[in-house]
């Protein structure tokens, strides 16, 4: 076979193989270690367990790691953040997509600058202390909303620009107010992008520990990743890698379910918002 032809067909297979190894090996390590007894899991490896005990490992991780409290705390932070990102992002995107002026263009550029500029965690913590929101859930919600609002606005603005203006003009002729047009026409048409933004924000916020550590500070308000860090630091999981990985598996299950349900919307939402 011609080397050029072989490389042409072999390159995609090589990329898929490397991607599969990069993702599959860590997943396999987590899965098999979570099913091993402590003696086998002291030094995590890719070998299958000689003695399987996934049930007791997961039960201990849930009970000893206080996962129920961390799960509730994560929901109380992530769900409001997603709702605010979607509502504020959709409203702002509608304005940016329909109004043309230098001021609107400047505001749009400022809003999407968050895609490039990383948040300054020290400045954020100081501002939250000044506002009395440090170590509180509202403060954490505000940070997540601000962090992911740029992404939401970027995708939704591109999508709304592709929606025919005639739909909104017909509603205005019928006497519909802007709020009614937004709720009855714009939002329903944004469902693919809304699904994409929901999954992306939930995946990032659900697994975040860096900002949660500085803003929530732990305690009774600790989210699932932060709660894992706390119990590990307290030596509850010292040398208990089977419990650590079991905790990680259980913590990841809700996001795996969300991804499987909405995976068809991800590509369509990203391409619709970025290309159109």
Image: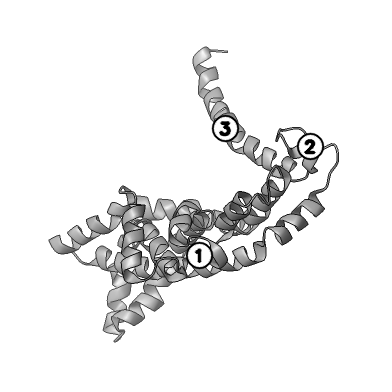
Q: Which residue is mark 2?
A: 40
Residue at (77% x, 51% y) in the render: 57
Disc on the earlier residue, 2 or 1: 2
Visible in this render: residue 101? no
Tell me residue 248's x, y (percent).
64, 50
Name the disc covering residue 78, or none: 1
Visible in this render: residue 126? yes
Tell me residue 104's x, y (percent).
19, 63
Residue at (40% x, 66% y) in the render: 134
Tell me residue 94's x, y (percent).
30, 68
Front label number (3 vs 2): 2
Alpha carbons under labels 3 and 2: distance apart:
32 Å
Disc on the earlier residue, 1 or 3: 3
Estimate how packed mark 1 is, as few (under 14), some (14 to 19) or many (20 or more) residues with alpha carbons within 10 Å.
many
Outermost bottom residue: 175
Q: Secondary structure at mark 2?
A: helix
Q: Nearer the viewer, residue 211 or 150?
A: 211
Outermost top residue: 2
Q: Is residue 66 left or right of residue 9?
A: right
């Amino acid at each position: 076979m011609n080397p050029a032809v072989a490389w042409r067909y072999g390159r995609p297979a090589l990329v898929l193989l490397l991607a599969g190894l990069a993702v599959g090996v860590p997943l396999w390590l987590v899965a098999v270690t979570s099913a091993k007894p402590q003696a086998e899991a002291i030094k995590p490896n890719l070998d299958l367990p000689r003695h399987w005990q996934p049930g007791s490992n997961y039960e201990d991780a849930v009970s000893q790691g206080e996962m129920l409290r961390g799960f509730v705390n994560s929901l109380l932070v992530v769900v409001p953040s997603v709702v605010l990102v979607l509502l504020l992002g959709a409203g702002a995107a509608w304005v940016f997509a329909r109004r043309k002026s230098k001021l609107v263009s400047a505001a749009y550029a400022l809003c999407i600058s968050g895609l490039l500029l990383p948040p300054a965690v020290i400045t954020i913590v100081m501002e939250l202390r000044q506002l009395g929101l440090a170590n509180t859930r509202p403060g954490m919600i505000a940070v997540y909303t601000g962090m992911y609002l740029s992404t939401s606005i970027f995708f939704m603005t591109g999508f709304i620009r592709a929606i025919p203006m005639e739909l909104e003009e017909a509603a205005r002729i019928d006497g519909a107010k802007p709020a009614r047009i937004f709720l009855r026409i714009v939002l329903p048409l944004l469902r693919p992008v809304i699904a994409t933004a929901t999954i992306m924000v939930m995946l990032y916020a659900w697994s975040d520990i860096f900002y949660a550590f500085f803003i929530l500070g732990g305690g009774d308000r600790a989210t699932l990743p932060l709660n894992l860090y706390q119990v590990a630091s307290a030596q509850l999981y010292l040398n208990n890698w089977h419990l650590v990985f079991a905790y990680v598996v259980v913590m990841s299950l809700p996001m795996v379910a969300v991804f499987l349900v909405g995976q068809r919307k991800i590509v369509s939402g990203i391409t619709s918002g970025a290309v159109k």
